Amino acid sequence: MKIIKLWLPVIIWAGIIFYLSSIPHLRSGLKADLVLRKLAHIAVYCILAFLIHRAFKSSFQIGGFRLIIYPAAISFLYAISDEFHQAFVPGRVASGQDVMIDAIGILSYFVFARILPASGGR
């Protein structure tokens, strides 16, 4: 049951990312659409990194650098696969720039995870 509680959110979140990437010509219609979409990339992959990190931390007997690098690598590989998927969606393109923006989101999670406990969670 613990495994389901840990990994089901990862699967659901990855599914949400896949679904959003499947929407042709996805735009908000707002003036700041480009900025909003790039911020969404960062937020979505920050959350994915958090969920994968949480699942790894409670599922496996690993720590230190491996507890960072494995979830980060899986998140990054998912970002790459997501961009590849978008290459086949009408009105969407695969973008290396978006993968790098996704990586910012992934790295942001690990920076925040490192800083917040050090500051007492404040």
Image (cartoon, rainbow, N blue to C red):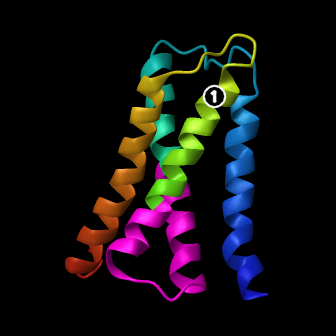
Q: Dot 1 lies on which element?
A: helix
Tell me the residue at 69%/14% (across/down): 25
Amino acid of disc 1: Phe
Work out whether 1 lies above or below 54. below
x, y percent for residue 55: 59, 75
When asked about the image quadrant of residue 103, the answer is top left
Q: Is residue 35 visible?
A: yes
Q: Is residue 36 visible?
A: no
> Horizontal placement of 39 versus 56: left or right?
left
Work out whether 114 lies above or below 39. below
For disc 1, the marked residue is 84
Q: Is residue 69 magenta?
A: yes
When asked about the image quadrant of residue 62, the answer is bottom left
Q: Main secondary structure of the magenta part?
A: helix
> Horizontal placement of 77 versus 10: left or right?
left
> How crowded is the residue under tag 1: few (<14 C-alpha within 10 Å), some, or many (20+)?
some
Name of the residue lying farthest toward the left? 119
Tell me the residue at 63%/28% (across/down): 84
> Horizontal placement of 11 versus 115: left or right?
right
Tell me the residue at 33%/79% (across/down): 64
Tell me the residue at 54%/56% (across/down): 74
Q: What is the magenta range?
A: 46-71
Q: Nearer the viewer, residue 101 or 67?
A: 67
Q: Nearer the viewer, residue 12 or 96?
A: 96
In the picture, the quarter occupied by the N terminus is: bottom right
